[in-house]
């Protein structure tokens, strides 16, 4: 069952209704407000670059309706073992050469076993030694586990809320909203930066999109990094037949994230490969200032590095150094 909105924060800074009002603004007004907030906190011509690698693919026992890595769905994704440390570090070196500042590692687990965490900690230490920021997403964590990751040098932990509290149970049944909030709390308590966002285009309505943004903005401290994903509908998953989200509606969500979380990096994540250059340009105008570099995001396609470089040149934008 979804957790009531009152469990998100003791005193929400942004209510669902307040965010809904933002999303309903005339598009030029919404973009103006978002761009004004963005310029007050960031250089609008700079974009933070991250690369995401699947270090353990498939076989996940969860039933997230969007995910091709769930063991219960026939998506053609084969379960694999945890990668070797040196192979991960080779991927990190290649990502750095292509301009990535942050290297993100994802494992398809409900929660990691301690023996697997030993290997992940070695990966984190190795990536840090390359001079890159580190991020992992491993599922649910206990506080002792987050403390171990912090000691290994972890900079960011990704754990998305996915959607609004009210819509959550229609997408996932193997864990509840509070499970996600608990992991985020452990991450914060360990002194690790939070990377937390959601997915749009899963059949939710505008109210649920407002609920997602309100939930993120009303965490005890807003996430330092907020990935906004457009659903990539994968054959074999329950959401395979979902209609793509309208590009303008997607830009509205990005703008609302920027306005409600002024100091956060707002990242264009999954679904960017299918976006036009014009749609991405509007997202940057709406306050997006981070992307995933590389041709693959875990198991789905992403925009190519040459295409990103050409788009940045066209827009007069540059990667953060």
Image (spheres, rainbow, N blue to C red):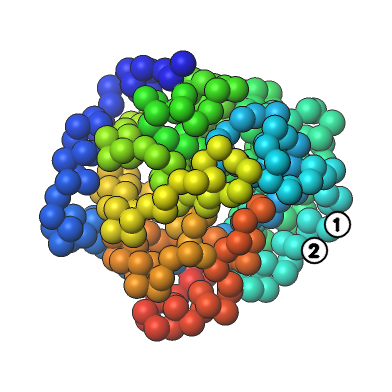
Q: Which mark is residue 239?
A: none
**Circle 2 residue:** 90
Residue, x 40% and y 73% (percent of image)? 277
Q: Do the residues labelled 1 and 2 touch (CB within 8 Å)?
A: yes
Residue, x 44% and y 77% (percent of image)? 312
Residue 305 to residue 70: above or below: below
Residue, x 63% and y 66% (percent of image)? 295
Q: Position of residue 30 (x, y in %)?
A: 18, 55
Q: Quadrant of residue 59?
A: top right
Q: In which quarter of the image is residue 2?
A: top left
Is residue 56 shown to the viewer in this render? no
Q: Where is residue 85 in the image (x, y as percent from the top left)?
A: 84, 51
- Element marked by disc 2: helix
Residue 43 to residue 312: above or below: above
Of residues 218 and 210, which is closer to you in this image? Answer: 210
**Circle 1 residue:** 86
Of residues 296 and 227, which is closer to you in this image? Answer: 296
* Left or right of 63 in this view: 261: left
Residue, x 44% and y 78% (percent of image)? 311
Q: Distance between the residues labelled 1 and 2?
A: 6 Å
Q: Position of residue 251 (x, y in %)?
A: 31, 57
Q: Where is residue 316 in the image (x, y as percent from the top left)?
A: 37, 81
Q: In which quarter of the image is residue 81?
A: top right
* Left or right of 278 in this view: 113: right
């Amino acid at each position: 069952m979804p957790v009531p909105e009152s469990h998100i924060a003791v005193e929400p800074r942004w209510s669902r209704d307040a965010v809904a009002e933002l999303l309903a603004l005339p598009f030029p007004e919404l973009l103006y407000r978002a761009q004004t907030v963005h310029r007050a906190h960031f250089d609008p011509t700079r974009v933070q670059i991250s690369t995401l690698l699947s270090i353990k693919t498939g076989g996940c026992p969860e039933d997230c309706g969007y995910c091709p890595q769930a063991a219960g769905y026939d998506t053609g994704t084969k379960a694999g073992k945890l990668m070797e440390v040196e192979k991960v570090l080779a991927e990190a070196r290649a990502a750095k050469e292509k301009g990535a500042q942050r290297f993100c590692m994802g494992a398809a687990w409900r929660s990691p076993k301690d023996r697997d965490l030993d290997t992940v900690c070695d990966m984190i230490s190795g990536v840090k030694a390359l001079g890159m920021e580190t991020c992992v997403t491993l599922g649910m964590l206990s506080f002792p586990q987050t403390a171990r990751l912090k000691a290994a040098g972890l900079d960011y932990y990704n754990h998305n809320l996915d959607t609004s509290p009210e819509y959550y149970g229609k997408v996932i049944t193997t864990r509840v909203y509070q499970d996600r909030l608990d992991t985020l709390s452990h991450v914060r308590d360990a002194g690790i930066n939070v990377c937390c966002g959601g997915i749009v285009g899963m059949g939710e309505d505008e109210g649920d999109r407002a609920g997602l943004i309100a939930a993120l903005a009303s965490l005890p401290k807003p996430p330092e990094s907020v990935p906004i994903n457009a659903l990539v509908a994968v054959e074999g998953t329950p959401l395979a037949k979902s209609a793509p989200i309208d590009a303008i509606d997607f830009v509205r969500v990005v703008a609302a994230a920027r306005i409600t979380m002024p100091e956060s990096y707002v990242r264009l994540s999954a679904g960017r490969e299918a976006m036009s250059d014009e749609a991405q340009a509007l997202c940057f105008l709406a306050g997006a200032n981070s992307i995933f570099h590389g041709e693959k995001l875990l198991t789905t396609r992403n925009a190519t590095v040459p295409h990103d470089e050409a788009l940045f040149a066209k827009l007069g934008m540059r990667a953060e150094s």
